[in-house]
Each structure stands twice: as structure tokens, then as C-alpha cells.
């Protein structure tokens, strides 16, 4: 059997730390600095975020993606309110109920097909407003790029935000893979999330080459009024903060965040092209960012995983997900395709 | 005015990362590894913990100290139950209500004087048991070493645990600075927390030289039955777990954790000795671990902080706290004493 | 325009108190009795419940239906667990998020068509079990009779419970209108909820003639171990308990609970028969209990409500719900049908 | 041994329903009325409250005292905030943690000696404000009359409220026995809670002759903006609301609420006077409202309780609490004193 590739196609969080970011960690390890963000690295990292997103933006850093979502959502919600989101959203499916547990709020989970929320999905729940028997929709949460690897165009976000705002709802954007969207759409971040009128977003670091660390960005500063209390109470305040900040500072410099994501996207494109000609592998749709969904023979899944692990997306459909990362090489892709082809051939 | 020392005496979390641990981070950055703890570093780090604490121990890693306390406590508690703890406990004072918020439980906070809980403090609340109008005491939480820099002797922990267990209560130990206690008492960890019958503890990494990462240790494995769900729901599951684990692996090797703590303790002892002869500085009590409490002239506090920052412990008493870290040098201590003496002299 | 009927068809909670129950309230108002259930009325009411449901049953009384559901569910759940229920369940739609808020748990809401949960609905979510990223299904909640006025047969409940138990899940039954089901199915309560292996149920009083008061019944007594603490913490412990208990005692005597429900069911049957011949009124399906769903011309809804108020069930479908109560008379039914016919005629 | 009195001295919630209020319940049982407060009784009861407290007041009714406190507090609090209250407060001791559980907030419990909070108690915790590591004091909660049977004078409330407001805190008043305070102080309600600038209060019904029902009164209407959602989510929305409202309507008519309380107070005064001359009974202090605290021989407590039940207040101090109610008669008092004297005599 072929030698497995040197990187996994399981998830972009199976990758390690980008060398530039590791350098930044080493460089930040110079003597003492006050904890909890009262340090120079944090000031500089926040400045970089404001350069990207506007000087009004308020930014707080958090440990991980679930925590960042919890902090952002909590700042927008009272416990009798609700979040409308796709039923495939990470906050709905993959966070062990953390958002509901912490905020006390219900998630109104909407089937969408492609992971993208439309105004019509919101509209159906507006009749709940004002009736004391029902939770009150207050936040619309979208993911860019989505858990399905699909993309909202800037206009689609703008339309959704306008509809939401016109009914008194706020817009939360889970941007664990926002960089991949920016790279794929070839837009600047401001036109994607500021001009479209998003209220709060998480900006992912971990899946784009950082060791750890996510940012919660409040594009309306008044929504951040209690963010520091919320973050601490949510257990999301890193004490040696400079090591989060130093990574963000380096990630945002010289467009490293976009370059990392663009590389992952392009490797996924290559993977899709190569896989398209593998008999027995049925690519579900052309990839838009760094995930590829494909159907393979059910019996081949376990042998494939044993050879080079990845996750099944939908067992009933025999559908799997393959992801590329900032450090996936062309050789990794080619090697993976070759091995998959060999194994699948045995199970057709 | 004297040049400030090159390290701060503000807190042990103002320090950076111990070079051996930074090496471990670099070494762990080798290609891909599955996320969430399904990796070799995590297996090895858990093995090291079991070597120290017994093969039955269950260990889960968390991002930070507040999160680790929340995860450990949640595994012991239903929301109508309560935690008895000193009113100076970190969980009571310094976590922005995270334990209450997450567990739903009340903390019954007991005045102690020295931060150490005694069986008599528990006894006074046992009358609550069984009465539906009252929260039900279920956990006793102690900190070793305490927030006051005091120490429980092994026998004191054993007595407390025996009393607690005899009334159906469990014992939680916040060990953010457990290493400093082990070093100061010159006991092995097992005799301090296993033989004394503690149920669950947090084992601190960040304040002892790690970049981030804490461990929750369940000494009764059945208490860990839901720990993985609790950790994820609490937002405390690091995705690139290997970087937490690699640090713990290195910290526990060759007693580095004890050596780091011992160094910090010894520097604090030197600091106390030197400060004892500074006019205007009144050392409150001899340090037992790595924190020193002293009274200084109220008017001198701000100038002192401007020169080299530290925290006021009790403004009404004009009492400050100075802490040493794994990387505090003798020169830092001497330089700090000299500068304090000079500034205090101006305000006597 | 016709005179409106003397009772409303809006809901069975628009009715007042059955005269026998009012007598019981008067009779219980004799001097002093200890609060919180330590009284003779409560002992006798519990005995009556045990006569019906078995001597092992544990029963606690609560103020209202939402509270009773919250108490029952909380006794079964830890906060990382989940409840599978129809997306039309009262706990999902009509309790302003109380179950999620109090238990911290997610409701996994399943589309059903007729409000009835089947094993297949549960099966689809069993893959979540054991994965720390997902909430853990623990309870299946059904309503008998359902919010759609449909009925589970005893065998259907038994099948569902067997399936649930075989996968480690418990069965909660919301019995706000359980009496209507018992009357309609002409079974005894034991064969409907005990022999079918339900774990916990709420037994409704308010919608069946009581002034207030609901019962939470634990058919496995070990599940009630913490019920008293849960009830108090949920704000559901009536202080002058005897007035809840006296009503339940009288309601359960001489099958009054069944007779009340049976009357309401029969009036609804009469209503359906009469409405079937009213042009412009389209009875959606024959009523099984005391609610009737019908489509009427959209423009007629408001005038009808102004004449004699009722609730719209589905505005998009122009579907309304009419309910009968223990005190609805044949004259009320006939009068209501006559008025509806007159008004609808004007809008066809 | 003497025949026990026909009423208990255990608590004012051991009493039944005042005959006028029972009449009101009967009178309200006339046919159908829409549920949840959309009825004429509720409109009239709210009008009566506004006559007493000002036309701006917003009033919502709840089932019980714990629920009313939870609803009132929740409307004032975000979960990282805290309530400062006496450590003897009902919300702190007797509600099984319901306020913390529901609001997520910490109670900062202050020792007071007499159950009365002073500005100095608040002042000590103001240093917490603005620091993300600490919960943020937001509400001051007082009880009038207190759990110790003591009274705040109007000026004392006004001073406390002024101090609280000047630091951005709100004032919550638990008025489960507010009527007893109004009667004892011989002031009108407005001068006690409106002119003193209380923000939110609960107004007790159950302990003053009602079968059930408490009111939450918002004296700043903007604080009630979400009260209906909070109430429903807290499980405190009575469906057949008219029966709560009818009682309040009758209770507030012709000063019945004050007359009931005044009677209970006067009976307690009589009890105190008579007990003062009983050898072995040591009245702790003259009663201010309807509770009397006394020390009796420890060995006599159980026999006394067996004869006519009451609650021990402080077992260590051998202190008991006796309470009078709206229906306690002079004969009851005299009979009780006689029996106590007889039993205590045997244990001196």
C-alpha cells in the first residue's frame, strides 16, 4: 500500500503552528509582562485588527473557537432571547451545547441544504416576537465560510443583515474559517463584514496556523460594553495573553492570514481536480474553500481511515470530508489521491 | 531612582515560558496530529501524571485555571448543591462568578483569617443537609498553597477530607500553585493529595513556567465519567491539544515542576529576609511559598507601582503582595529591595 | 349577530374551577396546617395517586404546567444532555425556553407531522452518543394527548419506551391533558403510563377543572431522589400546599378527572359533527380529544375572534383551534356553531 | 397537658385563607375568562396597585415568594453582576439557591446582626466595580420587615437607596411581609417604598391571608420591559390568573391588607407581653412586627413542638421563633402562653 501523505486531510486543526507564528511566540518570551492583556503585544495586535476593521472595532481575545462564540453571543443576548442559525452550524452541532448552557438561550435551528441562512429562514420565526410564551429571536448567526465549505457573497450577508436589523435582530458571524472566505472571494475583510453590517464576529486563528487563540470582534463598540466580564466569567481570559497577541500580530502582518488560507484553498482545488478522475470517488461539489466533500464506497471508509485518518461527514450517505491546511503540500495532495485511488479500487 | 529589576514581582503569571517548555513546544510542532487529545503527546503526559498520582487517576487538560476549576467542580455537583470554601478562595473572589454561573451552585464562603479551611467551618453548615429550602453542601474546596501563601500540612488535608467524607461531602483542591506547596513542604505529591484522600484537584501549569494549560485530576476515576462532556461544554477543550500536553510532559520530567517552584519559593525567602531590614516595610509574616505580604506607607504604593508594578492586596490595610517566579534572579530580588527601600524612605 | 356562547372555545384554561373542587378548597380552609406539604391533605392526595399508579410512585405537586415540566425534566438531566421531542411540543414552543434555561440542556426538536414521536425519530440522533463535541440524548419527551389533539395508543408508548430504554434514554410524558387521553382511549391510567414503562410524567390539573396545581409523578422512585430540592429551586413549591392537595384529592375521587375530560371530549365531538356541515368551515381531522382544528376563510378570523375569542393555530394555513372544557354545554356548542356559520357566510 | 391553641405559631403561612379573600375566589369563578392575565380581575387589581404606588408602577403577579424574588431580580441583573444582601436574607438562605441558579449571579452576603443592611455594608464591596476578575455589584436587596422581625424606617431605606443609586446600584425590596411593616410603622406604602426610591419590590399576599399569589412591582417602569418574558421563563405565569388577581383586588380594598397585618402584629405584641412573665422563657427583644424570638430551655424544645409545632431559629442558641397570623386570636395567644409555661416549667 502507498505511504500515507505526511500531513492529514482530517481537519485544518490537525496542522501544527506556522513557522512565522512560532517565531513570534519565541520572540514574545522575553522576560516579564503583566498578565490578562495589559501588555504591548496585545496593544499592537488590537491595532492591527483596527487597521483591518475600523478604529471603532472592539476586540477581545479568547482561548478557542467555542469560547469565542460563547463570549460573542453572550454579549448580545438575554436568556429569554434566541439565536436563529442553520441546523448545521458549529454552535448548534459541535459545541456540546455550550452556547445554550452559557447564555440560557434557545437556538432556533433552521434546515438550509447548503449551510447558508436566507432572510426567508428568519422571516418564518418573526411571529414569535412579543409573545411571552415564546423565546424572542434576537440574533442571527451565520458561519463564513460555512461548515459545508460554502460561501456567502458580500451582498448575501448585507441582505441578511439588513433584513435582520429591520426587525430588531443582530448579526453574529462565526469566522473560524473567515480567512478562507476572504481568500476565496478575493475581497477585503472590510467589504465582507463591515460594509455588510455584521455586528459581532469571531475571527479564527487556530485553524489558520496559530497554536491557539481566537478573536471576538465587536463592530458596534457599544455591544462590547460587558465583554471583559463575560470573557472572564466564561473562562476565556488567557493569563499570559501576550502569547495569543503575538501570534495575532504576526498573523495579520503581511497578509499572512490570507496567504495561509489561500494556500489551503488552492491545495483543496488541486485535491478536487485530482479526485475527480478517481473511479469510485464522487466529488459532491467543487470546493469553494479548503474542504472537499466526496462519496466513497462505504466499505472503503474504514480502510481509508486506517491508512490516513479523516472524518465521515454523513455515514448514511457514505460521504466524507477532506480538508487542506496552510502546510499541505502538492506532494501531500498527490500522494493522498494516489492512496485513496488504490484503496477505493479494492472496494468498488 | 534605581533601575527596576528585569522581572516583575506582580505575579507568577507575569513570567514567560520556561526555556525547557518552549523547547518542548518547538519539538511538538512536527507535522500533523489529530486534534482534541487523540495524539501521542497527550498519551505520554497522562502517563506521567499517573506515574505521580496513581494509575487510577483520570486527567483532562484545560486552557486556564478558572476553566479547570469550573470543569472539576461541575463534575462533582448538581445545581441545588453547594461548595464550602474560604471567602478568600480564588473560585469565590477572582473568577468573576464563573463557578456559580456554570454549575448553578452557591458558594458558601467562610471567613478563615489565613485562607485555610478547618472541619469546624464545615460543621456549621451541616444542618442545611436534607432541608429542601436550603442548598445542599456537597463539595469542600481548598487551595494548596492558599491565596494567602499559607500551607495545609498533609495531616490537615487528611483530617478535613475525613470529616468531609464522613458527612457525604467531596474534596476539591485548587492546585494552581500546588507545586510551590510540594516544594515547600518537601513531601511527594502522592502523600499530599492521594494519601490524604482528595477527590479532585487542579494541577497548575501556567504559574509554574508553562505558556498555558492546566490539568484537572480525578483521583476517584468514577467522578470523571462525564468530564469530557463537561470540558467541551465549558469551552475548555484545546483543539491542538498536543501543545498543552507537550508542555506538561516536559514539566513533569526530571522534577522540573518542583525545581521551578522551589526556586520561586527560595527567591521569596531571600526577598523576605532582605525586606525585613528595610525601614517602613513591615513583612506581615514569613513567606511559606512564593508570595510575600507586607505593609508599606500608603503614600508610597503608587510611586512603587510606577517604578515596578505589583498588586495591592488590601488597600485599607496598606498591604501589598509581592511574588517571585521560576525566573526571578537573586539580582532581581536585590535590585527590587534596593528600589523599594529608596522609594519608601521618601514617604515615611 | 348571534349572542356569543357563555363559555369560550379558546382553551381549556379559560374555564373556571369545577364546583366540586371549589368545595374542596372551601373545606380545606379550616384553621392552620403546616406549610410546604406537611399536612393531611397532601398525604391523602398522594395516596390517591398511588392508588392509581402504584405504591412505588413518587409524587410532588407544583404550581403550573411549565414548572411541572421543568421539575420533572431536571430530575432526569445533567446539563450536557439533551431531550428529544416533537418540534411542536409545549416544552419546545410554549414555555419561553424555561426547560433549556433551567436544565441547561438542548431540546432536539423533531418534525413529526402529527405531534407524535416514533422510534425512528430517536434513532437518527443516537450517533451523537459518546462524542464529546455533541450534547448527549438522555430523555425522550412525549405529550399525551398531544398539542395537535392526537393520541398515542398504549402500544405506541410502550414501543417508544422500549426503544428509548434499550439505548439508555428515559421517557418523560407531558400529561397536561392526560385525562383527555385516558377518557378517549377508554383505558385505565396504569395501562397507559405504568405498563408502557414511562419514567416520569406530569399530571395536569389546571386544564381539567382545578384552579391551579399540577403533579409530577416519578414512576421509578429513584428518579425522585432530588425532586424536593429541584422543586424548591425551580420556584415551584407552594407554601399553602393543602390547597393544591385538596383539589387533587377531590379530582381523583369518583373518577371526576375522567368524567371532566370525557365531557370535554364529547362536546368537542359534537362541535366537530356540527361544524362539518357549516359551509366555509373545513374540519382538518376528526377530533380525538378536546381540541378541534379547522380551516376558515382568512378574512373571517378576526370577526370571529371579536365575537367569541379563540386562537389561530397556523396563520399561513388559515387554521384555527377550538377547545372544549369540562363546563362547555351542548347549548354553548350549538350557539357557537350557529354564530360561526353566520359570520363565515359573510366572508366566503 | 393543656389543649394546644387552635392556630399554630409556626409561621404566618400555616394560616388558611381570609374569608373575604375566599369570597373573592368564589365570586371570580363565573364562567370563562382568557388565561394569563387578559381578564377584568387582573386589570382591576393592577389599578388598585397603581392607586397605592403611582400610575407609573408596573405590576406582574407570580405564584409564590421565591418566584417573585427571582422574577424581580432577574429583571435587574446580567449574570456577571451581583446582589449585596444580608446573610440572613430569604433569598440567600431559604430559596435553595433559586436566585443564583436562575440569574447566574452571585449573592454577596453580608453579616448584619439584625438583618438590616447599611450603606457601610455596600461600601466595602464597591472596590469590585470595574475589575473583570470580580462579579459586579448591581443590586442591593433588603427585606421589609426583615427575617429577624426588625424594621427599616423610611429614612433608612431612603439613605440606603441614595447611597446605592449614587454608585450605580439598584434597590430590590423583598416585601413578603411588607404589610406588617406598613402597619407597624403606621406609614403609607408610598412614603415607605416610593418616596424612598426603591426600584423593585415584591408585595406579599400569601403570608397575609391569600391562598397563593405574590406581586412584583416595578417602580421604574423601564425595568419591567422584559418582565413578562422573565416571568414565563421562570415558570411563574399563572394560567387562570383571575384567581390571583381577584384575591389581590380584595386584599387591597378597604385596607384589608393592613388590617390583617396589624392584627398579626398586635397578637404578637400580646404574645410578647404574656411570655415576658413566663419563667424560663427569655424574649430576645420586643417584637416589631409579627414574629417573636425567644430562648427556651433546650430540652423543652422538642416537647413544646410536639404539643404545638413551631420552628427553631438557632439551635446553638436554643432560640425559637413564634409567629402570629391574621387569624390568630387572643385566646390562641393566651392558650399558647399557658401551655408553653407549663411545659417549660418541667424542663428548667
Image: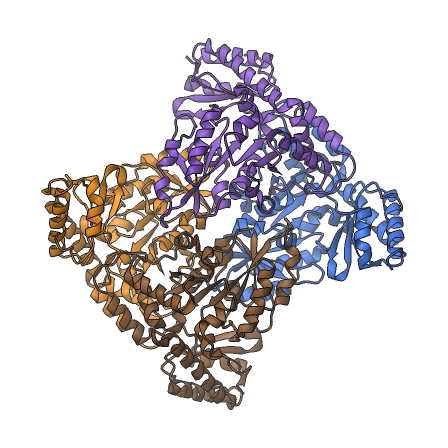
Chain colours: A blue, B purple, C brown, D orange
- Residue at 54% from the left image edge and 46% from the top image edge: A222
> Is residue B75 found left or right of D13 in the rendered image?
right
Above or below for A193 versus A130: above
- Using the rendered image of the protein, determine whether residue A199 is visible from the camera's viewpoint: yes
Quadrant of the rendered structure where residue B318 is?
top left
> Is residue D92 found left or right of C285 in the rendered image?
left
Above or below for B119 versus B280: below
Spot occupied by residue B87 in the image (x, y as percentages of width and height): 41, 33
Spot occupied by residue A198 in the image (x, y as percentages of width and height): 63, 51
**Nearer to us in this view, D274 or B90:** D274
**Nearer to us in this view, B33 or D220:** B33
**Nearer to us in this view, C192 or C287:** C192
Please state the total of marks drawn on the protein image: 0
Quadrant in the picture for the C terminus of chain C:
bottom right
Quadrant in the picture for the N terminus of chain C:
bottom left
In the current view of this chain or complex, which residue is farthest to the left?
D277
Spot occupied by residue D202 in the image (x, y as percentages of width and height): 32, 53
> Is residue D57 found left or right of D235 in the rendered image?
left
Above or below for B124 versus D101: above
- Using the rendered image of the protein, determine whether residue A150 is visible from the camera's viewpoint: no
Spot occupied by residue D19 in the image (x, y as percentages of width and height): 21, 66
**Nearer to us in this view, A104 or B147:** B147
> Is residue D199 found left or right of D145 in the rendered image?
right
Amino acid at each position: 500500500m502507498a505511504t500515507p501523505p505526511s500531513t492529514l486531510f482530517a481537519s485544518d486543526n490537525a496542522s501544527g503552528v506556522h513557522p512565522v507564528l512560532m517565531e513570534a511566540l519565541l520572540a514574545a518570551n522575553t522576560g516579564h509582562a503583566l498578565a490578562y492583556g495589559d501588555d504591548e503585544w496585545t496593544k499592537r495586535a488590537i491595532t492591527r485588527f483596527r487597521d483591518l476593521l475600523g478604529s471603532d472595532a472592539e476586540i477581545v481575545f479568547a482561548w478557542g473557537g467555542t469560547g469565542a462564540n460563547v463570549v460573542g453571543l453572550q454579549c448580545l443576548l438575554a436568556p429569554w432571547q434566541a439565536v436563529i442559525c442553520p441546523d448545521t452550524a458549529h454552535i448548534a452541532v459541535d459545541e456540546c451545547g455550550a452556547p445554550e448552557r452559557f447564555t440560557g438561550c434557545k437556538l432556533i435551528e433552521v434546515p438550509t441544504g447548503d449551510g447558508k441562512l436566507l432572510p426567508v429562514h428568519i422571516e418564518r420565526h418573526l411571529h414569535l416576537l412579543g409573545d411571552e410564551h415564546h423565546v424572542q429571536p434576537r440574533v442571527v448567526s451565520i458561519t463564513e465560510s460555512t461548515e459545508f465549505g460554502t460561501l456567502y457573497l458580500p451582498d448575501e450577508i448585507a441582505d441578511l443583515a439588513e433584513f435582520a436589523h429591520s426587525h430588531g435582530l443582530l448579526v453574529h458571524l462565526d469566522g473560524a474559517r473567515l480567512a478562507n472566505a476572504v481568500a476565496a472571494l478575493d475581497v477585503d475583510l472590510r467589504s465582507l463584514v463591515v460594509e455588510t453590517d455584521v455586528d459581532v464576529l469571531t475571527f479564527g486563528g487556530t485553524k489558520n496556523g496559530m497554536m491557539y487563540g481566537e478573536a471576538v470582534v465587536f463592530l458596534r463598540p457599544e455591544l462590547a460594553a460587558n465583554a471583559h466580564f463575560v470573557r472572564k466569567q466564561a473562562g476565556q481570559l488567557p493569563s499570559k495573553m501576550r502569547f495569543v497577541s503575538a501570534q495575532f500580530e504576526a498573523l495579520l502582518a503581511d497578509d499572512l492570514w490570507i496567504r495561509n488560507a489561500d494556500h489551503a484553498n488552492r491545495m483543496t482545488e488541486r485535491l478536487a481536480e485530482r479526485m475527480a478522475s478517481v473511479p469510485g470517488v464522487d466529488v459532491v461539489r467543487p470546493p469553494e474553500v479548503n474542504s472537499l466533500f466526496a462519496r466513497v464506497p462505504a466499505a472503503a471508509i474504514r480502510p481509508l481511515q486506517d491508512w490516513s485518518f479523516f472524518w465521515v461527514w454523513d455515514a448514511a450517505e457514505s460521504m466524507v470530508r477532506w480538508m487542506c491546511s496552510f502546510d499541505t503540500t502538492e506532494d501531500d495532495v498527490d500522494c493522498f489521491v494516489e492512496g485513496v485511488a488504490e484503496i477505493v479500487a479494492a472496494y468498488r
